[in-house]
Structures are given as C-alpha cells and as structure tokens.
Image: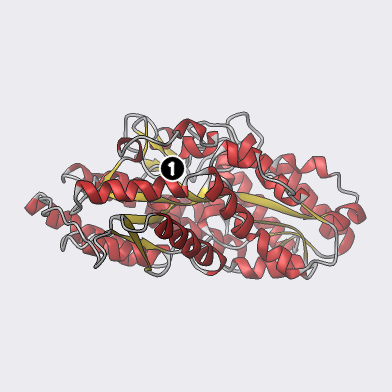
Amino acid sequence: MVFSKGTRVISMITAATMASCALTACAPSTPDEKTNADGEIVVDMWHSASGAANQTLQEIVSDFNESHEGEIEINASYQGGYGDSIAKFISSVQTGELPALMQANDVQTAWLYDSKLSTPAEDLGDGYDFGGLVDAVQNYYTIDDKIQSMPFMVSQPGMYVNDDVLEDAGVDPDSLDSMDGLLDAAEKIHDRTGMAGLTFHNTGWWVEEFQAAAGEFMCSPENGTGANRPKEFNLDSQTTIDLWSRIGELYKSGAIHNPGSGGDASNGAFIAKKAGIMINSSGNYGNVIDGNPSFNWSIHSLPSGTKNGGAVPGGNSLWAIKEGHSERTQEAAWEFMKYVGSDEVQQKIFNETGYLPTTSKAAEELNDLTPQQQGLINQLEDTPSSQITAGCKSGALNDARTSYESAMSAIANGADAKDEMTRAKKKVDASIENYNRRAENTKGL
C-alpha cells in the first residue's frame, strides 16, 4: 500500500490552491446538475480502483444503475492511483470541475475534511445506520463527531505466517502477539532455518501501523482527534527509536528480508519460502491464494502490546463533493453511497477483493470463510476504538509519509535508525507547520 506517488505534485498544487483561495476566498461556483438523454441525474465519480477491486466496483456501479434506471446514472471514471487522482482533484478546485463523488484513500482523509468541499456523510440524508459500522471503521472516519465519508473498501494490515516454518523453528504462534515477540520469532527462524524470519515492503504505512501497535500517537496532540490540529509527528520517542533500531539490526543480520518498496516483492518472498512471516495488507489475501503456497499458512492480527493500540484502518471511502453540485445531485450521490455501504455490497467486496466488510452485520453473516479470512475479520472486530487507532488526522500526512518512508528505506539499507528518524521528524514537522499555517489563513483549502 504505497501512497507516495504524486505527493510532491500534490504539495505544490495544494500550496498554489491555498494561495489562490486566500485572494478569492474560493467563492462557491454555481451549482451544476447534469442529466443524460434519458433525463437521469448523472453523478460523476472519480476512483482509483484497479485490478480485482476495479472489476468489483464496475459491477457495483452497473447493478446500481440498472436498479435506478430512469432516475440516476453513476458515471465512474478511473483517474489513476490515489496520488494522481487527488492531484487532479486539487487542481480542479479553481475551475469548479469537480466530481460529485470522490474515492479517496486514508491518507487524504484530513485534507478533504479541511477543504470544506464536501458534505459530511451523516448530513446527507436518512436511510443508513452509521451505528452499524464496525467500531474500528466508525472510529477512523469520525471527525468533529460526524462520519465524514462513506467507508467503501477498507483494509487493515495482516500478519501472514508460514505455519510449517514456525514449527520447524520451534516458535510458538502465541508469541507473535507483541512486536518484541514477532521480532524475536524472526530472529529465531533465521537462526534455525537460514531463511529470513520476516518481510514487509518499504511503505510509510508501516511506520504508522507500528506506531499505533505500540500504543503511541503518530502525531500530537492526540492524533488530531481532539479540538486542536496536530502540530508535530512523533518519530523520535524512545519507543520508536528502539523499535526501528532493532529492526535495523535484523535487516543487517538477514533475519528481516528487504523487498524494497513493492508489496508484490514481499508477497513473492513469502510464497517462495524466503521469509517465514510477512506483514501485508488484508487486500493481499487474494494474491497469496493465487500464489498457491506449498505450505500450511495462517493470518494473525498485527501485534499490539497495549490496551488502546492496534491496527489503523486503511483503504478508501466515498466523499460527497458539494462544491458546484445541486441538491438533487447530492441526493443522488447519497443513494449510491448508501448502496455501497450496505451489508450485501460489503459482503460482495470482501468475497471478491479481500477488502474488509465495513458493517458488523456484513461481517457476522459471511459464510464459508477460510481460517485465513476469519483471522482478518477477527482483527477488524477486535481492534479497539481509540484515538490511537483513529490514525493521524493531518492534511500534511501525505507529504509526511514520504519523509518517513525514506527513513524506513534508509534503515533497511543500513543507516542508523535514530539519525534517520530524527532527520525525518524535522522534515515532517516543517510540513505540518506549513500546512497548518496555510489552512488557518484560508477558508477551506
């Protein structure tokens, strides 16, 4: 789950847009309402789904359009990866040519909220029980006491385990319930079998996930979930430095395999039995299945050593963009948002893509789950709802993730963890300071 593509472009466009808004106050454009030849309200939706997720999304759109024939047409168009899509969105703010629905990933959540270009999902209308969302999902997408967007394709990290290797190395699976236990297991597997004990690709998402698993805020104060914007990133705490120093040592010894920045490379190492344990997205489940591993394997929850710590949800959600759109268009968008958030559609998404169901009922009524799928569901349901698992709510997160992703890569290649995390903190703190200054001096972004 690498989301850094386009980040530099986003930063430059965001700065330009903010500067323009400061001069023009970003006056709202005349509400627009598109209809097709059949008189249906057309709702343009920008998305970044690819592969199996794209196929499922197209089926969802087709089914919805068919059941709303004569009323609503969802016009879904692929805009490239998340970075490319949000860059195009930001550059379109000044022209007013914005979609009525925007699929955005986790890292873009705070920016879209701060932009004031969307209508909170809870304010759009009736007919949907937000209380039925899985606690961890509801917790993540709540800002200012409201669900801001409709959770769509949600993921969490999972720990993929070669059970045969654990048995050969004499590692108790129950010992994997803490980060220290996981790293000890990686070292033990390497010492006793010669293969790497652990692999995960170099994406800043893991820095955030490991931080949350350790029970620490990614940014302060309180991950930006309170009354104040976050002002700094917590990359230089002793817990963080100690963790990444240990990880660095295990890279050097060969106990952790370095696949670079590609999730496919870490998945390939796991399938080829070059690493006994892999940390990857829940959405990677299908890739492991397609790899047809020649060993017994299971999926465990990401280790967490604290009561309030745990895996922060990732994936994406749908935002209803109010800027430039009529009330009828917003109502039509809401109908589709309710549809994708339904139990039936969420079950379809899970069964076909590996993205996790967002509602408790959808999760409870799933049938014929493999033990591995059940492991993913268990983690989602067991994740505590806390300020820590809500993730860092800063519009500077996209830029910040690039900085500590670079630090993570440097550590994997032998650099000193304390030096790299301290250097990254200076960069990300500058990013958050600049973002806050611009946001506070403009109406929206």
Q: Residue at x 65, y 57 (%)?
A: 248
How are the colours assigned in the image? Answer: secondary structure
| Residue 207 screen position, x and y as percent | 54, 51
Query: How many discs mark residues in the rendered view?
Result: 1
The residue lying toward the viewer, choosing from 246 and 69, is 69
Q: Residue at x 48, y 61 (%)?
A: 57
Q: Which residue is mark 1?
A: 392
Up-down relation of residue 12 to residue 124 (above or below)? below
| Residue 157 screen position, x and y as percent | 61, 50
Q: Residue at x 50, y 44 (%)?
A: 342
> Is residue 432 in view?
no
Up-down relation of residue 307 to residue 374 (above or below)? above
Corner quadrant of residue 66: bottom left
- Compared across the picture, whether 325 is left or right of 386 comes to left
Q: Secondary structure at mark 1?
A: loop
Number of other residues with Cα within 10 Å of mark 1, as a class: few under 14, some 14 to 19, many 20 or more = many
Residue positioned most to the left: 23
- Compared across the picture, whether 246 is left or right of 229 comes to right
| Residue 148 screen position, x and y as percent | 36, 40
Corner quadrant of residue 161: bottom right
Up-down relation of residue 169 to residue 334 (above or below)? below
| Residue 179 screen position, x and y as percent | 69, 43
Say which amino acid is labelled 1: Cys
Up-down relation of residue 281 to residue 266 (above or below)? above
